[in-house]
Amino acid sequence: MKIVLKNLTKVFSKNKGKGEVIAVNDMDIEIPDGKLVGLLGPSGCGKSTTLFMISGLQFPTSGQIYFGDVDVTKLAPEKRGIGLVFQNYALYPHMTVEQNIMFPLQNQRIPKAIAKEKALAAAKLVQLENMLDRKPAEMSGGQQQRVAIARALVKEPNVLLLDEPLSNLDARLRLQTREEIRRIQRETGVTTVFVTHDQEEAMSISDIIVVMKLGVVQQMDEPQKVYDDPKNLFVAQFLGTPPINTFNGVIKDGKVYIGNEAIMDTTLEDQDVYIGIRPEGAIVSNDGILTLKLEQLEVMGRDISIIAKNDASIKPTIRFIVDAETKIEGTEIKVDLKPNKVFLFNKETEERLYEKEVSEEQGE
Ligand code: ADP
Ligand code: MG
């Protein structure tokens, strides 16, 4: 089921009506049928509010929500055909796994035998069919969350909505369970919206990610595309571990400078800029164009992590990841830069600046 959000806005009043928060601001996106879409952004950026509006648990201040061609903006949650999963599994502790999974079918007047069959099918989907008699307290967090997912799927919803479903799990279970969710989503083909503040999680699980900041959508695209082609400094900095290195830079007479080192030619006019360089964007070279003061080397199997300083960096240190074979000597390192790993941003708006040739190719 395709989901369309049209100019969706949610305003909350605060301080007893004296102020307001625009939790979601004019959100205009289309979630394609059968895809897993990750809603990504820092805490408080409006992810849950968006999900609650899609579910019908909250109603928008303005704008519309469509499921397929049907306007569901004012429809009650139980009429929308949604499955919901939250961070805290919210299972009934006194009920068995089977009873928990069957619970949503109770007020549907479904014969018990069929309800049991459906519960078994949902339990199989999350690979818990051997634990139907257990109580939640007898299961790991990951298993409990899979029960919650089975319960959300038992009514065969049009849309599955997951709000930070992995946040309560430890690191290993978080990895396992996210692979499970990916598999379940592929097997069922249910259109899924997955909310997380964890960029790595969003990148790994999503077909498409929507990056939000302060209620406003910053970019929506395939994860790799957002990483390779961030639209602004916020998106560039929010995605990637280790994070992108950011420098104060200057464009002068067709060259881009970090400090007094010209790192590349440009078609852009003279101005101050931010320069983002992905950690994998440096190549150590004796006659490299950018000089770094080495602080520390971390050898990590396949890679070496170079931790260094450069006066133009906006953070105290920068970090580049290079191949473990790389020879690094002395405390002053010279690096060349991979052009497709270097991004320029307008210093005021923090929007991405594109070279003239590049933007013509893109038909802009
Ligand atoms: P996220 O899920 O991305 O962390 P939320 O959607 O929960 O963010 O919140 C977005 C903004 O709206 C925050 O500033 C939050 O404080 C505010 N907000 C959320 N729910 C309410 C509410 N019921 N009343 C007032 N403000 C709210
Ligand atoms: Mg939230």
Image: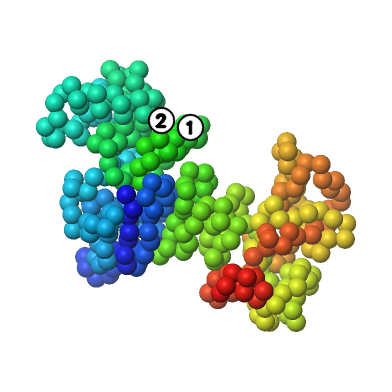
Q: Nearer the viewer, mark 1 or mark 2?
A: 1
Say which residue label 2 marks: 142
Q: Secondary structure at mark 1?
A: helix
Nearest to the observer: residue 119 or residue 87: 119
Q: Does residue 218 appear left or right of residue 271 in this picture?
A: left
Above or below residue 224? Residue 350 is below
Q: Does residue 28 appear left or right of residue 318 in this picture?
A: left
Mark 1: few/some/many CA within 10 Å (<14, 14-19, 20+): few
Quadrant including the C terminus: bottom right
Q: Quadrant of residue 121?
A: top left
Residue 115 point in image, percent of width and height: 20, 26
Residue 184 point in image, percent of width and height: 40, 35
Q: CB of residue at label 2: within 8 Å of ligand 2?
A: no
> In the image, what residue type sits under mark 1?
Gln
Above or below residue 266? Residue 207 is above
Q: Quadrant of residue 286?
A: bottom right
> In the image, what residue type sits under mark 2?
Gly
Say which residue label 1 marks: 176
Say which label, 1 or 2, has the lower sequence index.
2
Nearest to the observer: residue 2 or residue 280: 2
Residue 94 point in image, percent of width and height: 22, 24
Q: Secondary structure at mark 2?
A: helix
The way the protein has been coloured in the rendering is rainbow
Q: Residue at x 68, y 71 (%)?
A: 249
Distance CA(mark 1)–CA(mark 2): 8 Å
